[in-house]
Image (cartoon, rainbow, N blue to C red):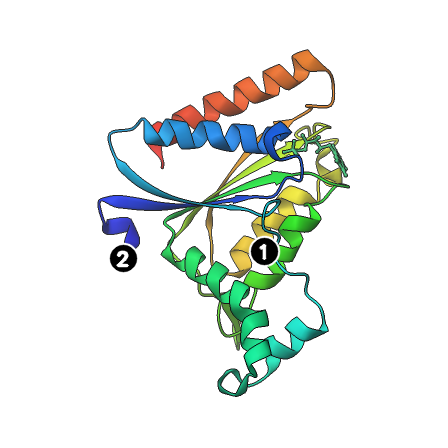
Amino acid sequence: MNSQSSSKNVLIIKSSPALEASVSNEITDFLVEQLKGKNQSYQFTIRDLAKTPAPIYDNQIMQAFFSPQDQLTEQQIKVAAPSLEYIEELKAADIIVFASPMHNFGITTLLKSYIDQICRMGLTFQYTEDGPEGFIKDKKALIITSAGGDFQQASEKHKDFQTPYLKHVLNFIGIEDIEVVPVQGVGFGEEAAKQAKSKAKQDLTRMAEQVL
Ligand SMILES: Cc1cc2nc3c(=O)[nH]c(=O)nc-3n(C[C@H](O)[C@H](O)[C@H](O)COP(=O)(O)O)c2cc1C
């Protein structure tokens, strides 16, 4: 099993259209540097969805996903290929880091398209008599959630559809060990942004030492 080998595979999913100006990317890159500085070996796979977006779930994709897989046309094999590649990456990972900006109270379009490609009945989950069962087991996930507002107080939490959604969908495909690192309130001015980033970096430094 991956987690028992001496090197850990870290899959990083970036999903900000802001690229180099992105807060979630900045904090994620900080984590990568922390891990690289450790006396342990990590292999990084970085999937930046802003640079190579996942395909949009359209009719072609739907046909390819739901046709008998041994009868796909060449075109359908091509259309379904990114989904299979993403799922293989997930299976090979020990740690999965989601850099997730809040857009319109949820996740970005870029991340939603990716999620639509990895939730595949028979490949990453199935329905059983006891309910859904996820196949992406024994992983640790870290969600870095950046937002202009701050949704950490009890009175604001209900407006955050990003964090509960991501936790739920990851649980659904079998990922149960999830840590969330918020970088929130970055829209409340320079000082607030600085503080939010600094707090997230502190949390990640501790996690890199203790749990990753
Ligand atoms: C299209 C768009 C929609 C946004 N929607 C929200 C929102 O609903 N709530 C919020 O608090 N911030 C919102 N923001 C602010 C972003 O969450 C904030 O800029 C954050 O830093 C984005 O992460 P990133 O820098 O990694 O892209 C939005 C930003 C954009 C560009």
If the image is split into quadrants, where does the C terminus sit? top left
- What residue is shown with label 1? 169
Residue type at the position of mark 2: Met
Work out how far the residue at label 2 is from the one at label 1, CA to CA, in angstroms.
Answer: 23 Å
Residue 76 or 121: which is nearer the viewer? 76
Work out which quarter of the rendered image holds the N terminus and state it. bottom left
User: Residue 24, relative to residue 193: is it above or below?
Assistant: below
Q: Which mark is residue 1?
A: 2
Residue 126 spot, x, y in % from top left: 52, 73
Residue at (57% x, 83% y) in the render: 73
**Does residue 140 appear left or right of residue 78 in this picture?**
left
Q: Residue shown at 25%/34% (left/top)?
A: 40
Residue 45 point in image, percent of width and height: 42, 46
Q: Residue at x 70, y 50 (%)?
A: 109
Eyeballing the image, is 81 above or below 144? below
Quadrant of the rendered image containing residue 63:
bottom right
Q: Quadrant of residue 90?
A: bottom left
- Taking depth in this image into account, of 94 and 203 the one nearest to the observer is 94
Residue type marked 1: Val
Which dot, 2 or 1, sits closer to the camera? 2
Measured as percent of width and height from the top left, residue 10 is found at 39, 44
Task: Locate ligand 1 by image quadrant.
Answer: top right
Q: Is residue 178 above or below residue 202?
A: below
Find numbered disc 2 in the image and state the secondary structure of the residue it sits on: loop
| Total numbered labels placed on residues in the image | 2
Quick check: can you spot residue 132? no
Percent of width and height locating residue 48? 55, 45
